[in-house]
Amino acid sequence: MSGSGKIARGVALLGSAVLTATLWLSGAQAQDFEPDAPIEMSPVIPADVDPAIRNRLLADGDLLLAHRLFERQQWTAFIALNWPIGADDKPLANVGDKGDPYWSSWIEIYQVFKPGGAEPDPWGARTRSLPHADLVQKPLPGDVAPAGYPALDSGDARVLHNLSSTLQRADVARESDQAFSFTVYDQYGKPAYYESLINKVEYDLIVDNGLYHAGGLATYIAENGPLTFPSGKFDGNQYGAIELKVAWRVLDPAKDDFSRYLTQPAYLPSGDNPPVWEPVTVGMVGFHIAQKTETSPQWIWSTFEHVDNVNVNRLKEITTQDGSKRRLQASFNDADCEWCPVNVPVEPDEYGVRRTQVTRLVEIPRETADLNAMVRAQLAKAGSPLRYYEMIGVQWPTQPDAPKQVGAAFPGAVVNLSGGVPLMKYLANSVMETFSQTGNAPANRQQRSVSTSERMVFGTGSCIGCHSSSPYDFSWIITKAEPKTSELAE
């Protein structure tokens, strides 16, 4: 490709000010990388960081600037994934336009991995199967969706049945855990809900190779060896596998300013014997991105949160959806309860209400916070609700060929479980990995520990560390594949 072609591609994917022409054409040094240039507002997801810039920064030993390269790429991905789309699933002109987020056109995990290894839903279908619908009252004949809500089985509906991202098959009526742990409740006693989605690249790999049922998965591995997902390539912006996890809280018109959230009409299971689907409005409070790329065989991991999750300016006045005025309150933390234990399961109070006291054990780094402020100002100028979200951090392998460490290796068996020597060492979303933030403990007693050392360390959640335990190339979703009903009968 010519030098001018490289410049054009860099402008399209990473922003016109990220690189100067001299960096591309004359091999200028890494200091020409502009870490604080404006982020490009684009509906195009960058498939990877520019490997030439990455390699040059790493050769110079500048991990901090290299990390900023990945932060910029993931902020760009977050904006593109949440870019508003029209009824035709095409991106609208501006990030501040009204429309569903682009990722809502992707497919839900429960539509791919079904009970009894059933066939997945078609990609892009305008109707969808319902999760474990036998456990929830189906719409009655003549029922219509409330005004402003899509039909329950519409491809446009958010059907939020999980209070959890645990691996086992979920019971819609009683599912109550986060990943490997417990339910997190907001300060109004409402649980957070989670959903997981994958892109077309990963969907095609799963469906074309029959990986959605246990027998097909076993056959594929026997014939091809360990499962490896496609990697995204910077050259040509070719996408690899991308997985998303989204966290929501139910919004209350009398307590919440809906304009501060990316909102969606949704259905939740409500009541008992059997529960029914209840229409609500939810606001996004957490967002995970995992991208398999050429530069990062251990994947790139990033997570974002709503700015009101755990710490707010309590003197700020907001106007709620019903028009009343009130002071802003953190959604998952009570600042007046300094003695409340944090990040632990909670019992009901005297009124029968559960409220999780959530905090962040690892603060957002100052340089990341400054980047967040810049990007949020851009989004505010564009009139997008994404201005109320912030990057918590990014993890990526600084030495992809370095093996993982276990046993007596210290601190490697604590922070290099994945191999690749990741940066950041720890990364946890406060409302999606609330209970994995453990703090000080002996290394061999940390969650998911592979260390034999008794030395005291600080430990908390790590996306890349957790997913490295999966037998399927850092992806837990494949473990959801069930045997086909016909296979069980044999």
Image (tube, rainbow, N blue to C red):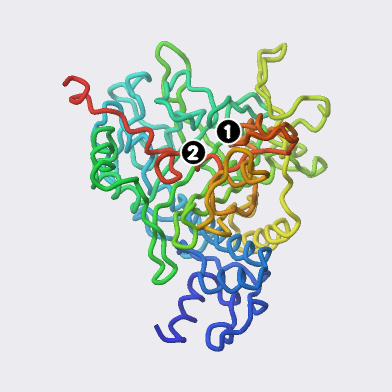
Q: Which mark is residue 166?
A: none
* Cβ–Cβ under 8 Å for marks 2 and 1: yes
State which quarter of the image contains the C terminus.
top left
Looking at the image, residue 96 lies above or below residue 405: below
The residue where tag 2 is placed is 469
Q: Residue at x 60, y 67 (%)?
A: 39
Q: Residue at x 66, y 58 (%)?
A: 376
- Left or right placement of residue 457 versus residue 477 in this view: right
Counting from the top left corner in percent of width and height, residue 381 is at 64, 63
Indicate the secondary structure of the residue bearing disc 1. loop
State which quarter of the image contains the N terminus.
bottom left
Counting from the top left corner in percent of width and height, residue 31 is at 67, 77
The residue where tag 1 is placed is 448
Looking at the image, residue 379 lies above or below residue 340: below
Counting from the top left corner in percent of width and height, residue 333 is at 73, 33
Looking at the image, residue 331 lies above or below residue 316: above
> Three-letter amino acid code at disc 1?
Arg
